[in-house]
Image (spheres, helix red, strand yellow):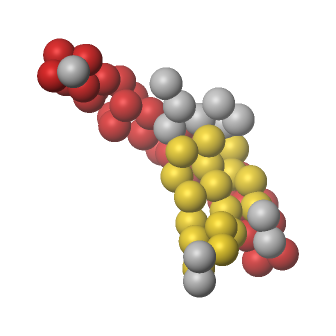
């Protein structure tokens, strides 16, 4: 299971957090700057990493039970 949070503007992906990578990755100049700032914020990084458990792991059994 992988948690991905992407940030877009005008259909262009600027930044993405992937739980398998464990940090934010920027795809544009603006996105790289945001990713660097967000990766330096330990509380934001740990909160985003915890979202995998909040969204994915709590709901995966519901998905398989209804499939």
For residue 1, above or below residue 5: above
Question: Outermost residue toward the left?
Answer: 66
The C terminus sits in image quarter: top left
Residue 50 in view in this figure: no
For residue 4, above or below residue 53: below
Expressed as whole percent of the image width and height from the top left, the position of residue 52 reads: 44, 33
Q: Which of 11 and 49 is in front in this view?
A: 11
Question: Outermost residue toward the bottom?
Answer: 10
Q: In this view, does 46 lie to the left or right of 59?
A: right
Instruction: Identify the residue shown where x is 56% and y is 58%.
Output: 6
Image mark count = 0
For residue 1, above or below residue 12: above
Instruction: Identify the residue shown where x is 68% and y is 51%.
Output: 24
For residue 16, above or below residue 61: below
Residue 57 image-quadrant placement? top left
Instruction: Identify the residue shown where x is 76% and y is 61%.
Output: 26
Q: Which of 38 and 12 is in front in this view?
A: 12
Question: Outermost residue toward the right?
Answer: 29
Residue 26 in view in this figure: yes
Expressed as whole percent of the image width and height from the top left, the position of residue 14 reads: 68, 69
Expressed as whole percent of the image width and height from the top left, the position of residue 19 reads: 59, 35
Instruction: Identify the residue shown where x is 54% and y is 45%.
Output: 4
Expressed as whole percent of the image width and height from the top left, the position of residue 41 reads: 65, 55
Residue 10 image-quadrant placement? bottom right
Q: In this view, does 1 lie to the left or right of 63?
A: right
Q: Which of 50 and 30 is in front in this view?
A: 30
């Amino acid at each position: 299971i992988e948690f991905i949070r992407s940030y877009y503007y005008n259909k262009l992906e600027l930044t993405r957090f992937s739980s398998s990578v464990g940090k934010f990755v920027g795809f544009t100049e603006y996105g790289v700057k945001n990713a660097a700032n967000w990766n330096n914020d330990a509380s934001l990084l740990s909160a985003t990493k915890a979202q995998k458990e909040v969204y994915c792991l709590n709901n995966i059994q519901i998905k398989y039970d209804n499939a």
